[in-house]
Image (cartoon, coloured by chain):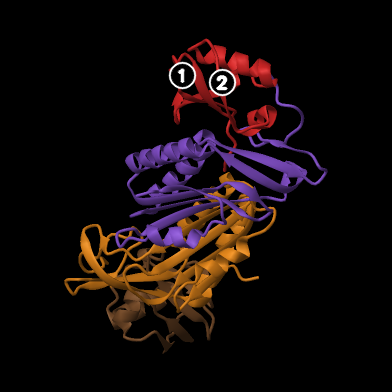
Chain colours: A purple, B orange, C brown, D red
Amino acid sequence: MKVFFLSESPIDAAVLARDLAHTGAGACVTFEGRVRDRNAGRAVCGLAYQAYAALAEAEGARIVAEAMQQFPIVDVRCIHRVGALEIGDLAVWVGVSAAHRDAAFAACRYLIDEIKQRVPIWKKESYVDGESGWLHPDNSPVQSEVGG
Amino acid sequence: MKVFFLSESPIDAAVLARDLAHTGAGACVTFEGRVRDRNAGRAVCGLAYQAYAALAEAEGARIVAEAMQQFPIVDVRCIHRVGALEIGDLAVWVGVSAAHRDAAFAACRYLIDEIKQRVPIWKKESYVDGESGWLHPDNSPVQSEVGG
Amino acid sequence: MNYRILYFAALRDAAGCDSEQVAIDTTDARQLYAELRERHGFAFAPAHLRVAVNGEFARWDRVLNDGDEVAFLPPVSGG
Amino acid sequence: MNYRILYFAALRDAAGCDSEQVAIDTTDARQLYAELRERHGFAFAPAHLRVAVNGEFARWDRVLNDGDEVAFLPPVSGG
C-alpha cells in the first residue's frame, strides 16, 4: 500500500488521517507544514515545489520503511505538494499512529526531518520585492546567486 | 479566548485545527488520543472519563499558558472528552502552531504530558470480562482494589 | 462548620454521591478527610490524594472556612 | 554513448529544459557533468550535487551505460 504521496492538488489531510485509525492505535501525531508569509524577515508572496517524482516516491517509501522498523508504530501516511502554492497552503503532511505516544511523536519527527533532508523536492520562493530563487536545505531565504 | 475545553459530545478536531492556522505559522503538530481495544493485554470494551470541570479547565488553561511562555509558538487548542466513550473514539486532542517545527513538536509533547499528569480527569476502563475500574496515573489496567 | 464536599472517581463510587453537605467541628482538611473516610470506607490514604478548595488546588494544611467547597482528588488518569 | 539527462530546480532554469538527450564519449558521471556544466553554465560544483541513475541515487564514480537516464540533483529543500 502506498504511504508516501506527491500531490499536484491541495492536500486533504482528513482522508489520510482516517486511514491511520486502528483499534490498537491509541496515539496519533501529525505534522503540517504550511507556506509562511515571511522567511527570516523577507516577505514571501508564494512558492513552488518541483520534485523528481519517481525518486521522491521511492525515497519517501524508504524513509517510511525505516520509521516502521525503528519505532513501534502502527501506520504512517506522508504527502507533499508539488506545483505553485500560496501563503497558508498546506505543503507537507505527515501522520503516524501508534499504540503509545512516545513512538508516535518520535516517528513523526523522524519522518519530517528525513523527508526534508533526503527526498528530491525543491522549493522556489517568491518575494514581495519581485525576487525569487531556489532555497538551500537550511531554508534560508535567497540572498544571491548559488555559489559554485 | 478559551484554549482548553472539556466536551461531553464527540470532538470535532477540524474546527479547532482551523483556529490554529495563522499566516506566520509554518508548522502545526497535533496529538490525538483514542480509546484502544487493549490495555497491556486486557481486552477493553469501553471507558468513561469523569472530570472536576471547573478545576480541570483552570488547570488546563494554566498548562497552555506555561507552554506559550516556554516555547516560541503561535497558538494552542486542547480538548478532552468526558462521559462514556467507545473503542476508537477520540478522547483527547492537542494542536500547536508555530513558526518552526522544533517548538511545535516540543510544546505539543509538553501539553499532553502535563495534561495527563495534572488535569483532574479520571478514566474508568471497562473490560470484556465484565470487570471495570478507575485507572492510576501510570495507566496500567485495573488489577485489584485500590491500595490504602 | 459546614462544608460542601465534592467526590470524583473511586471516591464518588464509594460515597455513592457526587457531593454532600457535611457539618463537622474542624477547620483542618486532614481531620475532615479522616471523618469522611471512616464514614464512607474510602480506600485512599491522604498521601495518595490532593486537596482542592473552592475550585483551586490547596495544601493539606489549608485552614478551611465555613461554607468552603472541598474536594479530595484521587490520582488523575486523563488523556 | 547516449544519455537522457533530467534537470531540476536551478539546473532546469539554467538549462532551459527539464530533460535532453546527449551523445558524449564517456561513461564517467564526473566527465558528463563537466561537459553539461560548460554547455549550460551551471553554477554548482560537483561536490554540491548528488547523482541519480535510472531513478535511483548513485555514486559519482558510477560507470554509466548507454541509454542511462541521469540526473544531477541540487541540494533538496522540500518540506
- Pointer 1 local density, CA inside 10 Å: few below 14, some 14–19, many at least 20: few
Figure disc tally = 2
Q: Amino acid at mark 2?
A: Val
Q: Quadrant of residue D75?
A: top right
Residue D22's disc number: 2
Question: Disc 1 on helix, strand or loop?
Answer: loop
x and y, in percent, of residue D13 in the image: 68, 32
Q: Are marks 2 and 1 in contact (CB under 8 Å)?
A: no
Percent x, y for residue C35? Answer: 35, 80
Q: Amino acid at mark 1?
A: Arg
Mark 2–mark 1 Cα distance, whole angstroms, equals 20 Å
Residue at the disc numbered 1: D59
Above or below: residue C4 compared with residue A77: below
Judged from this view, the residue extending furthest toward the left is B129
Callout 2 secondary element: strand
On screen, residue C36 versus residue B51, left or right, reads left
| Label ID, residue B10 | none
Can residue C58 be seen at all in this image of the molecule?
A: no
The tag earlier along the polypeptide, 2 or 1, is 2
Q: Residues within 10 Å of mark 2 (few under 14, many from 20)?
A: few
Label 2 marks a residue whose chain is D
x 62%, y 18%: residue: D36
Q: Nearer the viewer, residue B63 or A137?
A: A137
